[in-house]
Image (cartoon, rainbow, N blue to C red):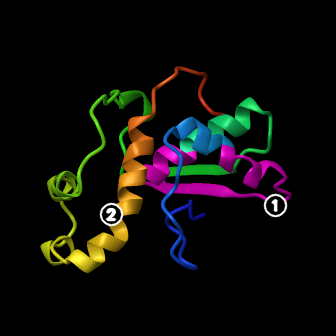
Amino acid sequence: MDHPGTSRQGRCPATSYADIQAFVQALVPLFADSQKPFAFFGHSFGSLLSFLICRALAERRLPLPRGLILSGCKAPACFEPIAQPALSDDEVLALIRAYGGTPEAVLSNRALMSFFLPTIKADLTLVRSYRWQPQPPLPIPS
């Protein structure tokens, strides 16, 4: 699944959601009428998003995925609230550099980064809005 701002079929405007729970609620209907078995694989921000979609499906007693595979992200209970203003482009690039794994040639390519930064910043806005709320474990194999 490509969420708004990351479509492989064409460049979409970065998501206008500022709250991850509102974003999740907008995505849940995509899975509500699933007639075929499905599973989620989420990496990085996609891990948190997949987890929250599964929680929302469970809360609504909708079909759950047969598997939930998550990588490249800390456990949802380990997120700490961040109450700082949105990051500038330079601050986002510094954060990406600190994570490691992205070649400097990519990070210093202004044209390429101007394409990706709106989506990265939208994702960071959503992650920053997340607050852990304890609930029973999901009944999904992981």
Name the N-terminal-most of marks 2 and 1. 1
Q: Position of residue 59 (x, y in %)?
A: 72, 30
Amino acid at circle 1: Lys
Q: Which residue is label 1 attached to?
A: 36
Corner quadrant of residue 1: bottom right
Looking at the rendering, the stretch of residues picked out in magenta corresponds to 26-50
- Secondary-structure class at tag 2: helix
Corner quadrant of residue 10: bottom right
Residue at point 56%, 48% (across, down): 50
Q: Which residue is label 2 attached to?
A: 117
Residue at point 52%, 22% (across, down): 133
Mark 1, other Cα within 10 Å: few <14 / some 14–19 / many ≥20: few
Q: Compared with residue 139, is residue 69 higher up or lower down, i.e. above or below?
A: below
Q: Position of residue 101 (x, y in %)?
A: 21, 64
Q: Position of residue 38 (x, y in %)?
A: 71, 58
Mark 2, other Cα within 10 Å: few <14 / some 14–19 / many ≥20: some
- Secondary-structure class at tag 1: loop
Q: Compared with residue 41, is residue 52 higher up or lower down, i.e. above or below?
A: above
Residue at point 69%, 49% (across, down): 65
Whether residue 22 sits left or right of residue 44 in the image: it is right
Q: CA distance from mark 2 to mark 1?
A: 35 Å
Q: Compared with residue 86, is residue 131 higher up or lower down, i.e. above or below?
A: above
